[in-house]
Amino acid sequence: MLTPIRAQGYARAIRDPLWGAKFMPQPVFTHQKNADGNFDSICGSCLEVAASAEKEEQLSRLELMHVCDPVRLYQISQGRNTRP
């Protein structure tokens, strides 16, 4: 089972019990304000909502916990940006 861990710098690490840590670039997040006044954080890598919060300042902490779905990343790399 893969476990997200916090890494130094601008990298994120995934700890795999068999292979150790693998570093990936930190995704860029876009914030948008919803009609209800809440804020969403959209991951620029997987194009999914990574976090939602009442205040925009709360999003950066929540973004640290986001891990992109590898299947979704593969679909995007193959030009399939839509959900089934």
Image: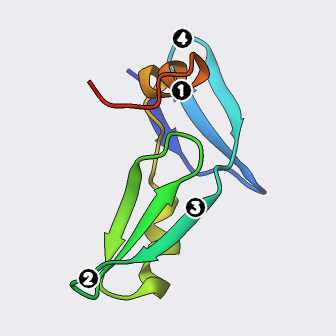
Q: Is residue 13 left or right of residue 82?
A: right
CA–CA distance in space, label 3 to label 1 = 17 Å
Picture layout, residue 41 above or below residue 7:
below
| Quadrant holding the C terminus | top left
Q: Disc 1 designates what residue?
A: 76
Q: Callout 1: 10 Å neighbours few (<14), some, many (20+)?
A: some
**Residue at 41% of width from left, 47% of height from top?**
48
Report x, y in % for residue 15.
55, 29
Would you say the residues marked 1 and 2 are in contact, meaning their CB atoms lie under 8 Å apart? no
Residue nearest the observer in this picture, 73 or 21? 73
Secondary structure beneath disc 1? helix
Secondary structure beneath disc 4? loop
User: At label 4, which amino acid type do we have?
Assistant: Leu
Residue nearest the observer in this picture, 5 or 72? 72
Picture layout, residue 56 above or below residue 2:
below
Q: Determine which of the numbered discs, if any, sits on residue 29 in the image.
A: 3
User: At label 1, which amino acid type do we have?
Assistant: Ile
User: At label 3, which amino acid type do we have?
Assistant: Phe
Would you say the residues marked 4 and 3 are in contact, meaning their CB atoms lie under 8 Å apart? no
Q: Residue furthest top?
A: 18
Q: Earlier in the sequence, mark 3 or mark 1?
A: 3
**Residue at 48% of width from left, 38% of height from top?**
68
Report x, y in % for residue 18.
54, 11
CA–CA distance in space, label 4 to label 2 = 45 Å
Q: Callout 4: 10 Å neighbours few (<14), some, many (20+)?
A: few
Q: Earlier in the sequence, mark 1 or mark 2?
A: 2
Q: Disc 2 designates what residue?
A: 35
Q: Earlier in the sequence, mark 4 or mark 1?
A: 4
